[in-house]
Amino acid sequence: MCNILIVEDEKPIREFIAINLKREKFDVLEASTGEEAISLLKDNHIDLVILDLMLPGIDGYEVCGYIRNNHSYTAIIMVTAKSSDMDKVLGLELGADDYVVKPFNTYELTARVRSVLRRTKKVNSREFENLVDGQIQVNTLTHMVYKNDQAIDLTPKEFDLLVILAKNPGVVFDRNRILDLVWDENYFGDTKTVDVHIRRLREKIEDNPSEPVYIETVWGVGYRWRIK
Ligand code: CA
């Protein structure tokens, strides 16, 4: 099942696209602003975003940049009323996977959705990794984490944190580096955020969170994944 996020400020168009994709058995989320889109992307696994360029506030180009920097597995189809080649080139350079120009018919859009999903799933499966460490298994394609074959629910941030550490056993990451990697350089939170997320992650993956064996604290520096 694929999750599709529709970002479009014009309600009738958004609902029309949503109805058609739901009829094709896709799971659909809707956002009417760029801000709303980013907040949904942070809390949900989204396979594909249908992204209108002209939005109030944060526009489609900015949302596109945000997705490419933070959710590399999410595909993007840009939708715009502009049809000039310049806009198309800019959109594709920013990392959109495809482009449709308004007015479009729903058959065209659905066909493009299917084609982009086929293409990106193929690419992502090449980048797929299955990290296994003891009882913990991390599937970077499906974003699933298992411990002793039991699925563990992680937030996207907890998942990213886990992958960064588990991919680099023994490497110490200081809190600022983790903030840069998991949040982004525009995030002005403080390093306590990292400690809070580490604590939650430990509560989910460690047998005994107060005596962690997977995520080790390196006092005065940061955190590292254990070396087996
Ligand atoms: Ca619009």
Image: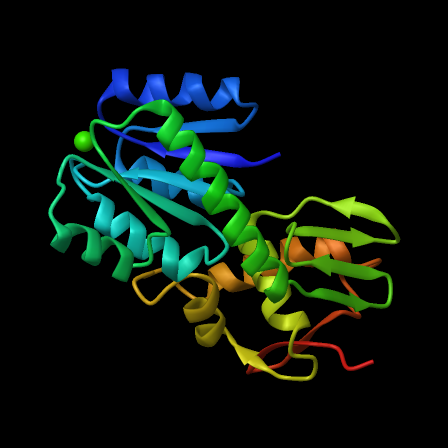
In the displayed structure, 102 sits above or below 150; it is: above
On screen, residue 121 versus residue 48, left or right, reads right
The spot of residue 227 in percent (x, y) is 77, 82
Relative depth, front residue between 151 and 199? 151
Relative depth, front residue between 85 and 171? 85
Specify the quadrant of the image occupied by residue 202: bottom right
Q: Residue at x 27, y 20 (%)?
A: 13
Relative depth, front residue between 155 and 120? 120
Q: Residue at x 80, y 70 (%)?
A: 213
Give the tally of numbered discs: 0
Taking the image in four quarters, ligand 1 sits in the one at top left
In the displayed structure, 23 sits above or below 128; it is: above
Which colour assignment does the render follow? rainbow
The spot of residue 114 in percent (x, y) is 49, 38
On screen, residue 123 versus residue 61, left or right, reads right
Specify the quadrant of the image occupied by residue 163: bottom right
The C terminus, quarter of image: bottom right
The spot of residue 225 in percent (x, y) is 70, 75
